[in-house]
Image (tube, rainbow, N blue to C red):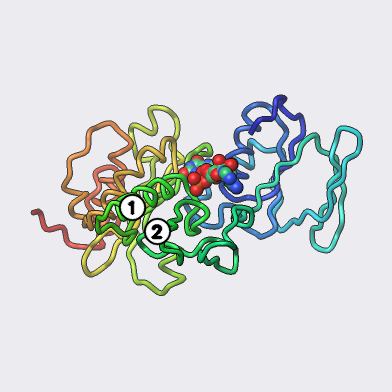
Amino acid sequence: MEVEDIPENLLVVGGGYIGMELGTVYATLGSKVVLVEAVDTILAGADPDLARPVINYAKKAFKEVRLKTKVGKMSTVGKQIKVEFELDGQKKEELYDRVLVAVGRAPNSQDVGLENTKVTLDDKGFIKVNEKQQTSDPAIYAIGDIAGGVLLAHKASKEARIAVEVIAGEDSAFTGVTIPAVVFTDPELAWCGLTEAEAKEKGIEVQVSKFPWAASGRALSFDRPEGLTKLIIEPDTERVLGVGIVGYGAGELISEGVLAVEMGATAKDIALTVHPHPTLSETIMEAAEAFYGQATHTFAKRKREHQPA
Ligand SMILES: Cc1cc2nc3c(=O)[nH]c(=O)nc-3n(C[C@H](O)[C@H](O)[C@H](O)COP(=O)(O)OP(=O)(O)OC[C@H]3O[C@@H](n4cnc5c(N)ncnc54)[C@H](O)[C@@H]3O)c2cc1C
């Protein structure tokens, strides 16, 4: 983050959110970015239909995106870095000015003297905590990345608040808390609650209602029609279990989704809430209206009868 020059040739290792965000930053600043990813998908945690516009952008803005490619070896050659790749059993060498390794983070739990306490770690080295952020040592609480789970700043802040409240004698706990994720690429990608992929993997029956931004006047007015807003809905109760948004400013829009999931809102609650026109927030309302086959700006086959409140 403290690099003083803009590298002409930058290799990004890892197609997770950090690799994609910083690859986007440096591509915008003028670097020729090559991104390599060992598996065959980019942004593996996100639903593929939401990740697609981000990947499409990267394919244009980056010099190259290479999937199923592993970095074998790296060594310095003068002021450059020689990188050896493995792709389909073939080896290839290239020179880069800088290499950004973004292949995951490990907890830094070994050097704070925890061995002198009753704190216990899991097999990856994260501190084990209960829902009150209490460790196995009654005198020690843990919050944030070191406590595992989703490694995001707003999760750390929420856990810190819970720990302080518990220490102050309140009955707080980290249960049922919805933690949104935002990928600050161009376009931005954001989601909260259940994803479609997760529902499929866990065998949870859901209905998905989508609103493409190509039908949003606001998205068209600043020429960003590539976005998509989707709701993951529990069929019987019509409760919104998850929200996913890709598009310009998705990180700002997702908070309405977080509120909906946290409050147990139904698709009807969102559909009946008047959203200002013309705004991107309307895409959330229209995705809910589409669930009932009643979106004004797009046709979607009715999934549920709409009973006005
Ligand atoms: C490149 C990058 C981009 C990210 N982008 C986002 C984002 O957009 N949104 C988001 O929500 N999250 C983002 N994250 C994750 C976010 O930074 C972390 O989730 C958050 O910082 C966790 O807070 P924390 O307090 O648990 O740990 P940290 O912020 O890591 O704070 C721990 C502190 O403890 C210090 N420390 C460590 N060991 C010792 C010791 N022995 N003695 C004293 N001090 C010590 C460290 O120096 C550090 O300052 C990003 C992370 C990275 C790496």
Q: Position of residue 28 (x, y in %)?
A: 62, 29
Q: Position of residue 18 (x, y in %)?
A: 59, 45
Residue at point 47% right, 55% down? 150
- Look at the image and tell me whether residue 132 can be seen: yes
For label 1, being within 8 Å of ligand 1 is answered no
Q: How many neighbours does mark 2 have within 10 angstroms: few (below 14), some (14-19), or many (20 or more)?
A: many
> Would you place residue 31 above or below residue 83 in this image?
above
Residue 68: quarter of image: bottom right
- Point out the image quarter for the N terminus: top right
Residue at point 38% right, 34% down? 219
Alpha carbon separation for disc pair 1 and 2: 7 Å
Residue projecting furthest to the left:
309
- Look at the image and tell me whether residue 232 can be seen: no
Q: Earlier in the sequence, mark 1 or mark 2?
A: 2
- Point out the image quarter for the C terminus: bottom left
> Would you place residue 263 above or below residue 20 in this image?
below
Residue projecting furthest to the front:
116
Q: Position of residue 67 (x, y in %)?
A: 69, 54
Q: Mark 2 sits on what residue? A: 133
Ligand 1 position by quadrant: top right
> Would you place residue 53 above or below residue 120 in this image?
above
Residue projecting furthest to the bottom:
203
In this view of the protein, which residue sits in the foreground, 215 or 40?
40
Residue at point 33% right, 43% down? 255
Residue 217: quarter of image: top left
Q: Position of residue 168 (x, y in %)?
A: 28, 51
Q: Label 1 amino acid? A: Ile
Q: Mark 1 sits on what residue? A: 162
